[in-house]
């Protein structure tokens, strides 16, 4: 089976794929939309993309694609620890404090704000499509005296020197990745990291009705359904129009979730189930278990 992921090699998404699906063929794509497109075009059978970081919040491009651009169900979720390191070309190792520009994914830069403020104050940061893309760029451009924020696997893959380890602001740094597929593929690997089931529901409220959100939440509350996430995003149809993404802590059943959907539809809400899927928590930091594939 071919699994597309946000590449290049050695992104955090790649690490999640290697740990979850060690025997499958993985295919890197340069951007998150490229992963969605490849899945739609049947170039791959599954796609793995980041959805949310514990420090930085949602990856909006993933949410927006899921809701506005494609009709692809979530078939699993994987949460993985995230350790960020600062790395430079080995030629510039001793001069790293003179770094003139820092590259990384916007989420990674934001996760390391305190380190950057303390140790590389005022140095400009430039966003790349992923952390590994930043490492790859530094590898091919030693002359610009740049640095990258990325993981240990990326330092090995692209031959960079880590000059500061664990530069993320808060120790508990994890990212949630989602697995998408057109087919119902049973996820059999990593049984010991299985944590339970979730159902993700997208809800659009009827416009301008007082108490509508309260009514939506009540439909879950009186059925004693636990919600692990609620988030609003713009509908892109005009200022003030939002939809909600709600994660319910249970597998889709024949009674409770259909009951919620029917109740919300009766209240003139639009409801779409984005997936009902198992979720996994990978606990092993990249340091201990991963090696670089060439
Ligand atoms: O750039 C990567 O390595 C990714 O896999 C993307 C991503 C993200 O989108 O949040 C994933 C985990 C980290 O939080 C930083 C970046």
Image (cartoon, rainbow, N blue to C red):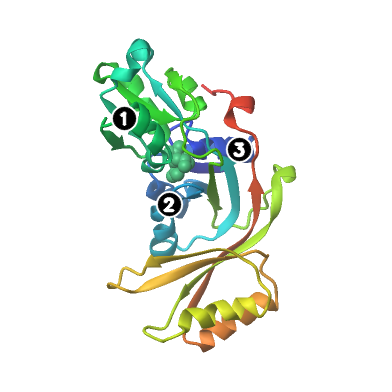
**Is the residue marked by circle 1 packed among few (<14), some (14-19), or many (20+) residues within 10 Å?**
many
Q: Are marks 3 and 1 in contact (CB under 8 Å)?
A: no
Mark 1 vs mark 2, foreground winner is 1
Looking at the image, which residue is at 36% across and 30% down? 118
User: Would residue 128 appear left or right of 10 to someone viewing this image?
Assistant: left
> In the rendering, at what x and y percent does residue 232 appear?
43, 66
Residue 106 versus residue 61 in the image, above or below: above
Is ligand 1 less than 8 Å from the beta carbon at label 2? yes
Mark 3 vs mark 2, foreground winner is 2
* Residue, disc 2: 59
- The secondary structure type at the circle numbered 1 is strand
**Is the residue marked by circle 2 packed among few (<14), some (14-19), or many (20+) residues within 10 Å?**
some
Is ligand 1 less than 8 Å from the beta carbon at label 3? no
Per the rendering, the mark at residue 102 is 1
> Can you tell which quarter of the image residue 67 is in?
bottom left
For marks 3 and 2 on the same chain, the one whose residue lies earlier in the sequence: 3
Image quadrant of ligand 1 equals top left
Q: Are marks 1 and 2 in contact (CB under 8 Å)?
A: no
């Amino acid at each position: 089976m071919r699994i597309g992921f946000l590449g290049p090699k050695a992104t955090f998404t790649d690490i999640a794929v290697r740990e979850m699906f060690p025997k499958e063929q993985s295919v890197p794509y340069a951007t998150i939309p490229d992963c969605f497109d490849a899945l739609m075009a049947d170039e791959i059978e599954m796609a793995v993309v980041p959805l949310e970081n514990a420090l930085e919040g949602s990856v909006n491009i993933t949410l927006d694609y899921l809701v506005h651009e494609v009709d692809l169900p979530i078939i699993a979720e994987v949460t993985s620890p995230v350790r960020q390191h600062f790395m430079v070309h080995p030629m510039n190792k001793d001069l790293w404090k003179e770094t003139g520009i820092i590259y990384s994914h916007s989420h990674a830069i934001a996760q390391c704000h305190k380190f950057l403020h303390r140790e590389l104050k005022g140095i400009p940061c430039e966003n790349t499509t992923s952390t590994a893309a930043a490492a790859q760029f530094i590898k091919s451009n030693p002359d610009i005296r740049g640095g990258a924020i990325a993981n240990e696997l990326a330092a090995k893959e692209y031959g960079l020197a880590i000059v500061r380890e664990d530069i993320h602001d808060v120790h508990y740094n994890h990212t949630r990745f989602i697995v998408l597929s057109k087919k119902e593929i049973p996820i059999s690997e990593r049984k010991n990291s299985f944590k339970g089931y979730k159902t993700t529901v997208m809800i659009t409220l009827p416009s301008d009705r007082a108490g509508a959100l309260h009514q939506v939440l009540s439909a879950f509350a009186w059925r004693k359904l636990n919600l692990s996430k609620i988030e609003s995003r713009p509908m892109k149809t005009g200022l003030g129009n939002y939809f909600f993404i709600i994660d319910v802590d249970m597998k889709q059943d024949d009674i409770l979730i259909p009951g919620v959907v029917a109740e919300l539809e009766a209240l003139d809400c639009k409801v779409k189930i984005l997936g009902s899927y198992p979720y996994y928590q990978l606990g092993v930091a990249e340091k201990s278990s991963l090696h670089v594939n060439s």
